[in-house]
Amino acid sequence: MLQPLVNLQSRNSRFKQVYSILTQIFLFTTKHSFSSTNTLLENPQAAPSAETNHTLKDLSSFNFAGIARTVISKCSYPWDTDKGDNFTNLSFKDYLLRLSAISPGTIRRFWRISELKPQHVLEILRGFEFDAGKYEIEVKKVESLWGIFKWASEENRDFKHLPQSCKIMASMLVRVGSFREAECLLSSRESQGILLDSQEIFSYLIEGYVEELDLDRAISIYERTRGLSLIPSVSSYQALLKYLVELNETHLAFRVYVDAVEMGMGMSIKEEGIFENVIRLLCIDGKVQDARDLSKKVMTFGIEPSSLVINAIGRSYCKKKDYDDLLSFFAEVRFAPDAVIGNEILFSLCRNFGVERASLYMQKLEQMGFCPDERTFGILIGWSCREGKLRNSFIYFSEILCRGLKPHLYSYNALLSGIFKAGMWRHSRDILHEMNDRGVTPDLSTLRVLLAGFCKERQFDELKAVVGDMAECGLIEISVSEDPLNNAFMLLGFNPLAVKIRRDNDKGFSKAEFFDTLGNGLYLDTNLDEYEKTMTKVLDDAMIPDFNSFILESCGSRGKRSTAILMLIEEMARWGQELSLPVSSTLVKRLCVAPFSMKTVDSLLEIMFQSVYQLEEETLNKLVQTYSKNGFTSRARILFDGMVRRHQIIENETFTTQLMDLCNKGNLRGLCDCLLLARQFNWTPKLKDGISLLDCLCQNKWLNEALELFETLLIVRPQMIANTFCTFLEKLCGEGFTTIACILVEQFSDQATILDETAYGSLISGFCKEKRFAEAFTVLDTILAKNLSPPLDVSGPLIPQLCRSNYVEKVFALKNACLKEQPSVFLSVHFALMNGFFKSGRVEEAASLFKEMLLTELVPDVEAYNMLVQGYCRVKNLEKIRELLGVMIRKDLSISFPSYRNLVRMFCTEGKFPFALSLKELMLSERNLPECVLYNILIFYLFLKHNTVLVDAVIDELQKKGLQFDGVTYNFVIQGFLRSKDISRSLRYLTAMMGEDLRPSNRSLRVVISWLCDNGELRKTLKLSREIELRGWIHCSTIQNNIVEALLTRGKLHEAVDFLDRMMIKGLIPDNIKYDYLIKLFCQHGRLDKAVDLLNTMLKKGSAPDSSCFDHVINGFSNCHNLDMALDFHAEMIYRDLNPSTTTWNILVCRLSENGRVAEAENLLYSMIRFGETPSKEMFCSLIDIYRSKRNVSKVSELLQLMQENGYAPDFDTHWSLISNLSSNSDKDESKNTRGFLSGLLSDFGFALKKPNTKMG
């Protein structure tokens, strides 16, 4: 058994926040009331005006801490969870109702249980055990089941769930991601001594916590699993190991992987590259022996180490300089290193122990099968030159040629450097000729070697020749006027002005260092020490290429493309070198800003032989930001998690990108984790970023988090409080949370600098958008009382509503306020007023405003004229319309589509069809409008007046113009011809429309099928239905009801059932389907099974059947003597707040009585009375007859009394039977109650009892 994993890094407490079963999403609907809305707007006149309040307070001095909690606490109802459903304090029946919406048939038999027992819970869980298919439904289902599960234990502390129930419940919780709840369930069972040895549940928990990036919990569950001698699944091992590898948790990854191998899962997880990554982590941490032992261990299980494993172990041995053990390792695994790792080993040997030992080591490697390449010998050549062993370097060079390899450019550079350092500069030309013969083209690095060598040897004539040759090759550019020496010195890093060649004019040539071809003594006028050092460095650097320097230089070069940098990295590996940590950091930062895919960045991180967390913190932050911005949420979060675990510095931008990415992905739990961390790290977002995040939170309906972020922004950005407040207010109102915005405004009620017209304008816009105009009017009162003027975009929509509500005084007050503050909006305000007057039927007032605009010499635009046209159309003032149209034509003003539609409607309604046709021609001639739209409007209103003659003319005209019918045209003609009783043409156009792959509207299909069914055209109906079905179009309630009714009317019961079954199988049933009528029909036809099926479908689709549906089903089951099913439906009716009919009560009581279930019948009778219903006499008699036959006098007496209280008199037989029974038992029972009852009963029947001493006669 695996020992407990020790020394696990304790995760910071900020990750320990526990969330409920579902993510907390706060939805606010307009039906909820808030206590503060009226308080906010109470006594608006008391507020100081903008004119008198000139003292601006410094808002940064206010303490805004706790404002989010205050706003939340002021809500007058509990915050809701997940899509608005409030699951707090629900009863057992409430949970059943919710589950019934998912599977009514499964729940139905549990409506009547009086006491929940463990077996009941198990049966309910088994009924819902399998996945519902849709995640949203599955979540709601599991939430309700978990509610029942908890409710049972909370209601009765002695309640003991069955182990199988716990197993199923835990499995379902894990399936929907409720890992903490599942873990809590497992822990509670274990505390009671019940071990749920379900490997599947524990495996899902491990995977779930890994997915949530909660390593502590994942490891904890893993340890518990192994402690119970259970073996996690392959997928859970894979998930946990991948996570550990990405976090670079070497110790844990090693222990878990060893356990997986010992459990026989090594081969199963081999494909995921986990083995290689674990080895790599061990080697990075310097635990090469552990890596080697693990490699040997897995080999015993049939897993051969890959080249990645060999390379990692080889690289680690090189770092430890333990080359003998490395050789024994190669022999042990019978593996010959490839060129990459072989070159790395030899490079390491040369650097640490010299080239001779490296050469001997290479021979040993060759004996194992190693094949050196040209770069292998290039490494030996370079280090030989570095060590001054020029002869050996040429031996290695000859070895390259002997093996048929092509020497690399860097090898030639090394030889040139060696030759120059040895003073053999004359042979440099031989090397260049050799390069030319081998097809190796010199580059700038070769040029620098030649320049440095000739400079060192003071061969400036040769140097000039080299510069000229390089210019001819295009490696450098020089002008004719430039001195080649200056170019050479610049290429070597010198300032040309600092290096001068001067002639020695002294007789003894005391200063001369060299002579030209004419015998002149020359010398260098410069800092000779610096000069010699520079030349020597250039030559030394050329012997062994420093790829880290190359890459660093390339990263700093703006013109250097990232592809060239990546090619350098590949070449670097071939030369046995590796990226240094500083260069890796610089390179990662460069790639993050370059247009590269994140796969390129991942590839770079994989080839690094360091932990990614060893990179600079700035680089890590940039990496997380880049992952987040590119949508790699999981990768970003894991890297971010690793930084937090290592207590590394996290930048503000990193938090911001993480939060935005999580918000956009809808990951509330991750968002809450990150927000909590951000606050503890003193996150200070930029205002722009904070506003963007607020917007995203509001769109996701996560108001709790939005309010907390708002509070954070107020605190960390005090200089931007007003801007933040107004923006957040606008976001809240725009997303339908105006009431919450009101509560927020109340918190700032004494801040006149914030509560300006913009803030109040947002409230008005929000209330108008939510159709809560009364509240909008109240806010308007507040604005006007403060002498403020709402923005025009707020006043515009508000004015028509004020007009409709007959608030004329407020309308003009608003108008005056707007014009006072903003005189330039005169036209816009008047247009809004005109629009409001027209929509409220005040045409004359609108016309007066129009005249007022003309008197002020302001020219109304086309919108004003169109408003007048539409207004006069409403009152059918044809004379005014003619005048307006004349003016508009003279002024060349366009008639809008709404005006055209209103005009056509009025002309057609009044029978003035020529006017409608003329208007259509006018519209066609004046503007380049969509002609089809104009024809559609005309066709529609012509059909309303049943003028098919003109419709035909319009259609002919349309077709002659080559215009094609669009979907609107088809729908209009289909419905229009049907209204005109021309079904053949309606069907023809419907067929044509479907033939063009256009979908008719639901209304078109509905009216056509209804007409066909009503007129007995069943064959055509079914044919059309089949076409709709083949296209996968949903059949609405009307279509299904009409088709099924038509089939049933003709006795085609089987066909009707088949049709409905097909609708269900093909998913062609809409939400809120109505089957009420069909349920009754199937009950009448004796198909109770189908009636129940339809009723269940309605419930699943969110449609509530009416009480008569249940009545018919109950009566059907009662008549079939299936009383249990009838009682189940009856109980369901009651809990759905439906009232059973008297007939339903009657048949249930009577059938129960007939079947000897008299106690149940009596309970139903009393239930009926409690519900305010009056039982029938038949119900009383059926019960009394049963009790009388059983000689249960007390029950008979009780029921007779109840019967009388409900206005019924027992018949003589019942009465006499009771008297007989009472008389026969009088000697045995002299109870006063019995005599009292008998006296009362006889009295009710008109008999007066005499006293014993009363005399007769």
Image (tube, rainbow, N blue to C red):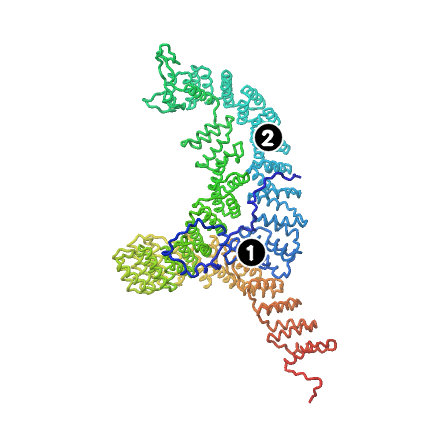
Work out which residue is located at the far top of the displayed protein and give it.
Answer: 508
Tag 1's secondary structure? loop
For residue 1222, side relative to residue 931 (left or right): right
Q: What is the quadrant of residue 797 in the picture?
A: bottom left
Q: Which quadrant holds the C terminus?
A: bottom right
Q: What is the quadrant of residue 813 in the picture?
A: bottom left
Q: Which mark is first along the chain, 1 or 2?
A: 1
Camera sees residue 992: no
Q: Within 10 Å of the Cα at label 1, are there few (<14), some (14-19), or many (20+) other Cα atoms?
A: some
392 up-or-down from 1229: above or below: above
Residue flagged by tag 1: what amino acid is it? Phe
Camera sees residue 601: yes
The Cα–Cα distance between marks 2 and 1, rounded to whole angstroms, is 55 Å
Which residue has dot 1 on it?
A: 87
Q: Are marks 2 and 1 in contact (CB under 8 Å)?
A: no
Residue 274: x percent and y percent?
A: 57, 36
430 up-or-down from 1020: above or below: above
241 up-or-down from 987: above or below: above
Which residue has dot 2 on it?
A: 288
User: Which is nearer the eye, 314 or 513?
Assistant: 513
Residue 154: x percent and y percent?
A: 62, 56
Q: Within 10 Å of the Cα at label 2, are there few (<14), some (14-19), or many (20+) other Cα atoms?
A: many
Work out which residue is located at the far right of the displayed protein and give it.
Answer: 1227
Residue flagged by tag 2: what amino acid is it? Val
Please tell me which residue is depicted at 28% across the width and 56% down the height of the picture: 893
Residue 892: x percent and y percent?
A: 26, 55
Total numbered labels placed on residues in the image:
2
Residue 799: x percent and y percent?
A: 36, 60
